Amino acid sequence: MTIARRTFRSLAIRNYRLFFAGQGLSQIGTWMQTVAQGWLVLHLSHDSGVAVGVVTALMFLPMLLLGPLGGVIADRVDKRKALVVTAAAQATIAAVLATLTLSGVVELWMVYAIAFTYVCVTVVDNTDGDLDAGDVDLDGAPGEFQVSITVLGRYTIRETVAPPGFGIDPDTVTVDFIGTALHVDVGEAFVDERPILKLTEFGYTNTPTGTPTGGVVSGTTVYTVKLKNFGGATAIVSGMLTVTVSNAGGGTFSCSGSGVSDCTLTFSGVSLAPEAVATFSLTLVYSDMADGAVVTAALSASYTTPPDTTVVRIPSGVPATISFTVQAD
């Protein structure tokens, strides 16, 4: 790609062309107003150089005093809306000055006030704030981002929004754009990782009640479920473990444990960091089961990658079912 094409390739983006044209006209109008304002002050003050110096100082004082505040505002509001509001305010202020001048009622203090107010508005307009992916992305390919930087300085680049189902890369990259080159490449790639959940344990212990004299028809069963995150991003996992008994005859059973209701263990919104293990358990107590009674435990689970909730994944090994049969003889 030639130097000329690299220099002007940002103009291939329609939105950027509109922004460039609008800013060009706005800057022309601003400097026309600045020159006319100086001549107006010189006329009203009867050729006073001090008055021209005062109005000039008032034009730069807000940027000096309110620049940090303007940066805070620019970081916290929608940039398109901020540009629209500030441009409309500048046009209104210019119209007020023109009306006062053409009507012949303008006074020196009015020009001072208008000059100060005008620059107070441009404090937000001239502050960069954060550059987001939606500002001027010149590369539409997924996973690629290119921004046209028009201001010299040091830029800290970080990822703020990851693709759906992936976690944000926490790394930051600092680049210096000092004008020695027409463009600066970021050599470090941002890598988005995802959680990977696997069922690593799903089993039970079965302890008889008392000393069996025949088959075991009464006992305590403790189910244990373990899910591990083998990925590189945090997961939010939800699911349930349900225990049912069929052909119980006159036998009875009950369940207990944290999050257990009606023999169903429910877990929701459990955060699981990389390499972390989530453990869930349910205790079943059964008594006087009929011969051939079947006890079944069914596990289901799913997980998402915060803050995204659109991509729902199923842990490896899930759904899963285990059962045992009571033998009374």
Image (cartoon, helix red, strand yellow):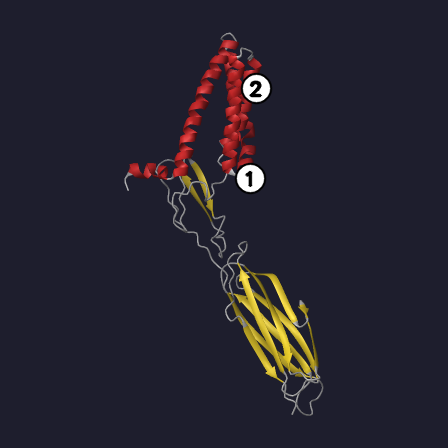
Is residue 173 something one can see in this rendering? yes
Graded by Cα atoms within 10 Å as few (under 14), some (14 to 19) or many (20 or more), the crowding at tag 2 reads few
Graded by Cα atoms within 10 Å as few (under 14), some (14 to 19) or many (20 or more), the crowding at tag 1 reads few
Q: Calculate the distance from the C-alpha at mark 2 to the C-alpha at mark 1.
A: 28 Å
Depth check: 53 or 30 in front? Answer: 30
Q: Secondary structure at mark 1?
A: helix
Q: Circle 1 is placed at which residue position?
A: 76
Considering every residue shown, the one lying at the far top of the view is: 46
- Could you tell me which residue is drawn at 52 percent across and 18 percent down? 97
Label 2 is placed on what type of residue? Ala
Q: Quadrant of residue 14?
A: top left
Is residue 63 something one can see in this rendering? no
Label 1 is placed on what type of residue? Arg
- Residue 12 image offset from top left, x and y in percent: 35, 39
- Residue 48 image offset from top left, x and y in percent: 51, 9
In the picture, the disc for residue 113 is 2
Q: Quadrant of residue 151?
A: top left
- Could you tell me which residue is drawn at 56 percent across and 29 percent down? 66
Q: Relative to 63, say whether 226 is above or below.
A: below
The quarter in which the C terminus is drawn is bottom right
- Could you tell me which residue is drawn at 51 percent across and 20 percent down? 95
Horizontal placement of 116 versus 152: left or right? Answer: right
Q: Relative to 63, say whether 310 is above or below.
A: below
Disc nearer the start of the sequence (2/1):
1
Depth check: 169 or 175 in front? Answer: 169
Horizontal placement of 35 versus 223: left or right? Answer: left
Horizontal placement of 45 versus 179: left or right? Answer: right
The quarter in which the N terminus is drawn is top left
Q: Are marks 2 and 1 in contact (CB under 8 Å)?
A: no
Q: Secondary structure at mark 2?
A: helix
